[in-house]
Image (tube, rainbow, N blue to C red):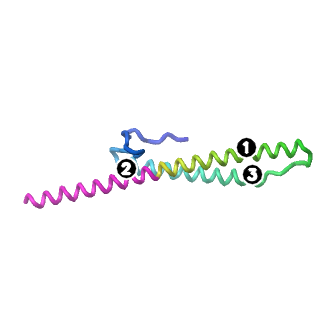
Amino acid sequence: MPELGIQNQEPGVGGRYMFTDLDEVDSIILELEAMKQEIDSDGFELYAAVSAARNPAEDGMSQGQVQAYRASLEKAIQHNGMMARYVTDQIDKLSAALSDYTGTDTGAAAQVRAIGRVDR
């Protein structure tokens, strides 16, 4: 898994991130979205592998091997789903943080402009 550029991260409140560079947040969201697409693609491949599993013969050993193979793939599918949910949650948190920062910056800029107009 690639290392994400979260060097400027500061402890957040309530599971939220705090950043000093909004462009960094945008780039991390893009990295996570790409990662999510890869996870989803892997999930489709896992489902296809389960569907394609067939007994090579009708004896008990062959059937047991295919059952074990399917059980292993089912665990991989569960893990894939957990990773997808985790990455989606991180995207949602970062998007919310970006929205908060953008709203705060816009509001602060409007206040500064308003102060400048009053002083003139």
Q: Estimate the x, y position of residue 17 in percent, counting from the top left.
A: 39, 45
Q: Which residues are magenta?
A: 92-120
Give how far apart the Cα atoms at labels 3 and 2 are: 41 Å
Quarter of the image that includes the N terminus? top right
Precedes in sequence: disc 3 or disc 2: 2
Quarter of the image that includes the C terminus? bottom left
Label ID, residue 120: none
| Amino acid bearing label 1 | Ser
Q: Secondary structure at mark 3?
A: helix
Residue found 49% across the figure and 50% down from its top: 89
Q: Secondary structure at mark 1?
A: helix
Magenta residue check for 85: no
- Quick check: 120 left or right of 105? left
Precedes in sequence: disc 2 or disc 1: 2
- Quick check: 57 left or right of 29? right
Q: Secondary structure at mark 2?
A: helix
Residue, far left: 120
Give how far apart the Cα atoms at labels 3 and 1 are: 9 Å
- What residue sits right under mark 3 in the picture? 50
| Amino acid bearing label 2 | Asp
- What residue sits right under mark 1 in the picture? 72
